[in-house]
Amino acid sequence: MSLLDTSQQADYLVWLKTVKQRIHSARMKVALAANSELIALYYELGAQIVEREAVASWGSGFIDTFSKDLKLAFPDVGGFSAKNLRYCRAFFRFYCDSSIWQQAVAKLAETPWAGVNDELRPCIGLIPWGHNILIFTKCKDLEEARFYIQQTLEQGWSRDVLAMQIKSKLHLRQGGAITNFKTSLPTPQSDLAQQTLKDPYTFDFMSMTAPFNERDIERKLTEHITQFLLELGKGFAFIGRQYHLDVAGNDYYIDLLFYHVRLKCYVVVELKNRPFIPEYAGKLNFYLSAVDSLIRREDDHPTIGLLLCRDKNNIEVEFALRDLNKPMGVSEYSLLETLPDNLKGSMPTVEEIELDLLQLDASLDK
């Protein structure tokens, strides 16, 4: 097609963009519907296997036979390996209320997801099977599973990211920072801000060789900014490191400055390579006042502070934050520390330790 003029071409491009978005949306709905049907099928297969194990006397090897027969009947369909069928069994056992599983099996033909918690039912089918396997094999109960299902849907985690978050026990760290948000922020802003901060933060994606200071940590974190933002959580946008502030003609530098798009506020992060002391809270309070006065826009919410320390006493932190009017929280952080080069040579190698043990055994045998 040949467009006659620039205005027609512009109209065509706008229309084309709208149609492409509609097609993309339709394809996503089809993909999600197909995924949901597949996950529901796996749940039903798991239920059938559990029932057969309970009422039939086929022996423990019937799943292998069942797998071979299904693959023979459906050669072009994946997911029928013996290993995956055992995952299906574990899937059903994890989510179905054990007290009603017999009734659930009977109802599955007319009610998909029978026996599953009503809140979880519409969510399980929205995430891929590989994600589901990670959740029901790594989580100890439904409450923990609910957390990772919701976070996967909200954050759009890949399977590798989900595995990392489960391994780092994010469900125990989320919202764990000690803060003064309830007294310094209105609800629901205070609740959302509380859930945004963790305790502790784990920076094991970077290694540090002692001795090192806060600037070294800042530099390493910004060098690994993608992993750092992932650990901070969804919504953080990096503004700068050693961000300059001019207050009454004096120079001050914020360790790390972020903007949180969901909270609609700036977030000041201060790093301390030592245990918490109350004076740190006072300095952070000063920085928050400066950012609110010099940078914050009219439509921004009050700036939030996050103090990251290598260690803290929770009672000291609570006392230090109690009467401060600026919203802030305190969390611990950990990172991977390596030995200095001048000490590595003095440490025994695995081979040397094994040789010493062999010599010890020989001396004991004499």
Image (cartoon, rainbow, N blue to C red):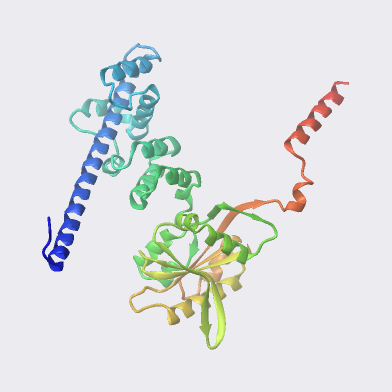
Q: Where is residue 252 in the image (x, y as percent from the top left)?
A: 56, 79
When asked about the image quadrant of residue 81, the answer is top left
Q: Which residue is drawn at 57% across and 65% down?
A: 271
- Res 275 seen here: no
Q: What residue occupies the far bottom of the structure in this picture?
A: 248
For residue 204, above or below residue 280: above
Q: Position of residue 75 (x, y in %)?
A: 28, 21
When asked about the image quadrant of residue 212, the answer is bottom right
Horizontal placement of 305 versus 2: left or right? right
- Res 256 seen here: yes
For residue 122, above or below residue 206: above
Q: Which residue is drawn at 12% across and 61% down?
A: 3
Horizontal placement of 139 versus 334: left or right? left
Q: Residue at x 18, y 60 (%)?
A: 13
In depth, the one of 266 and 25 nearer the eye is 25
Quadrant for the N terminus in the image: bottom left
Quadrant for the C terminus in the image: top right
Q: Position of residue 31 (x, y in %)?
A: 24, 41
